[in-house]
Image (tube, rainbow, N blue to C red):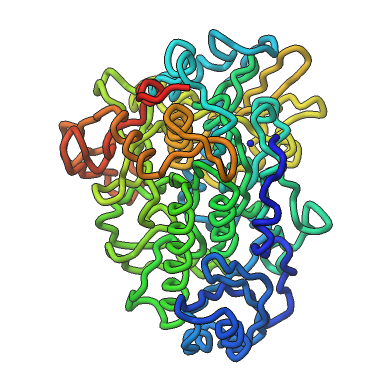
Amino acid sequence: MGRIIRWAGALASLALLASAPAATAAGSGQYVVVYQQASSLAGARQAVRDAGGTIVSENTDVGVATVRSSDPRFVTRADREPALYGAADNRPIGRAPDQTGKPSWRDVESERGAPNSGGAGLRPSVSGDPLSGLQWDMQLIGATPSGSYARQQGSHGVRVGIIDTGVDGNHPDIAPNFDRGLSRNFTVDNSQPGIDDGPCEHPSCIDPVDEDDDGHGTHVAGTIGAALNGLGMAGVAPRVDLVNIRAGQDSGYFLIQSTVDALTYAARAGIDVVNMSFFIDPWLFNCAHNPSDSPEEQAQQQAIIVATQRAVDFAHDRGVTMIAAEGNESTDLGKPTSDETSPDFPIDAHRLRPVDNSCLELPSESPHVLDVSSVGPINLASSPFPRKAFYSNYGVEQTVVAAPGGDSREFFGTPQYNAPENRILAPYPRNVAEACGEVDANGVPNGKTTCVTGGTRATPLVRNCAQGVCALYQSIQGTSMAAPHATGVAAIIVAQRGKRDVARGGLTLAPDEVERVLRRTATDTPCPTQEPFVYPDPPVPPAPPLQALCEGTPDFNGFYGDGIVNALAASEAGGGR
């Protein structure tokens, strides 16, 4: 996602979770503890000891620590300590098997596929990269050679952090913009009996900063800033600086300590924009006082809410614009009613529980985080406007803007229905394809779909070659794919209007100003004429037809917020460099 490290000394106070040993003994556990803000550091540390815990790592920027304890009552005991706000599970997951039941976010995104394509020369492209014909998403937002690329392609002075499962920094479409020096890994891939009985990919269980063993983070990074280089496809901001700030495990789980550490690192490292296409496990909805949860579970969720907001506030106050995926549950987040996926670990711990608007999806519903809903391609036979994707969450309280995320169920009743071209094309790591058996010895896709854990793929991977260099791409869908389009546009805004960052180098622009321009330059999109909108897709018996109520005006509504992001308009929004 190379720039040399400038701030190693300033970051020394951050103890990385990546250095923490796994808690594997029977009856032992790892927890994240949140200190009371009024407590002294010494007092909080003593309180951890008094509760029966041992500090493994500590983030003093926001008063959050990873703690190991063999006492099964540790969370309850920590909650009773006046110097501590509370505690939450921070169990390492490792590579999860298919039956983990990871929520619908991943099920939706695993529906992928795209046709094969030819190649072109490895040189700066002026007419679009070879696979640009498959990028309806870039065409929709004006990120094309005749659009924003001709005016503002981003800048290596703008640093974009990808808080995800890692980034393949060696992928030919990402390598030109990948900042290996600033990239960090804040998580560990641990083996856990009953969860992951196999060895870690690396002896230390810590992946290099240029590795992605999942593929999700690489896809996100490519949408933001794949290079315009005559190979494959190009991102929204093809000259931006891409920084891997890994917080997600290979299994796709994001725990609170790694997320907090990633955000505070971004703030101290001079990152301008971060993309967060995930929710913090194990709770899809974090409820402070849900009567269906036990007192211990309530305390855990309270700790996650407070720790997340402290990290978000820390990053916002230091110039980081935070953009998040709104989620794939087809839910009005202002009116949620149930959560059937939490807690999503240990295996089979999830249950159906009632939730309400006091419950939060995190980090997307934290103040200062910009929520992005997803749209599919335009189907002129039904509407001149892109519809909200069938899976996308929405709501007038949450949605800031919308962006292309794909919709496999668009074009119902036509040969284009469920076509792979309706998803989002972006880079795919070869190491993942090889581990999954999806390519032969020469890296050519073989049609296998070994790694799918939910949903279906229409066709295999894309492979594109030029001048002896080949790369793989996949087409998937989800709000995880929508958010990076907005992140790329935000990077364009910083490049276009940002000022020199004297303290940390590069450019900088206040997050509130980035948000203002992002909203102002978005394309107003009205609610559907049919209210509530009923998706013309065959329901899965015995489920009722999928429908969603869009509240608001053409200027602002729950489906699209202030509109669909517009890279061309953002590239013309004053400033200019």
Residue 555 in the image: above or below residue 96? above
**Would residue 391 be visible to someone looking at this image?**
no
Q: Nearer the viewer, residue 110 or 400?
A: 400
Residue 149 in the image: above or below residue 438? above
Residue 57 in the image: above or below residue 424? below
**Would residue 445 be visible to someone looking at this image?**
yes
Left or right of residue 172: residue 113: left
Q: In the rendering, at what x and y percent does residue 568 appear?
A: 39, 20
**Residue positioned 64% across, 30% down in the render:** 177
* Displayed quadrant of residue 390: top left
Q: In the rendering, at what x and y percent does residue 148 appear?
A: 44, 18
Q: Quadrant of the N terminus?
A: top right
**Residue positioned 62% across, 30% down in the render:** 427
**Residue positioned 46% across, 75% down in the render:** 37
Q: In the rendering, at what x and y percent does residue 145 appear?
A: 49, 12
Residue 102 in the image: above or below residue 300? above
Q: Nearer the viewer, residue 312 or 42?
A: 42
Labels in figure, total: 0
Q: Nearer the viewer, residue 538 or 364?
A: 364
Q: In the rendering, at what x and y percent does residue 521 appear?
A: 31, 28
Left or right of residue 211: residue 160: left
Left or right of residue 41: residue 36: left
**Residue positioned 36% across, 40% down in the render:** 513
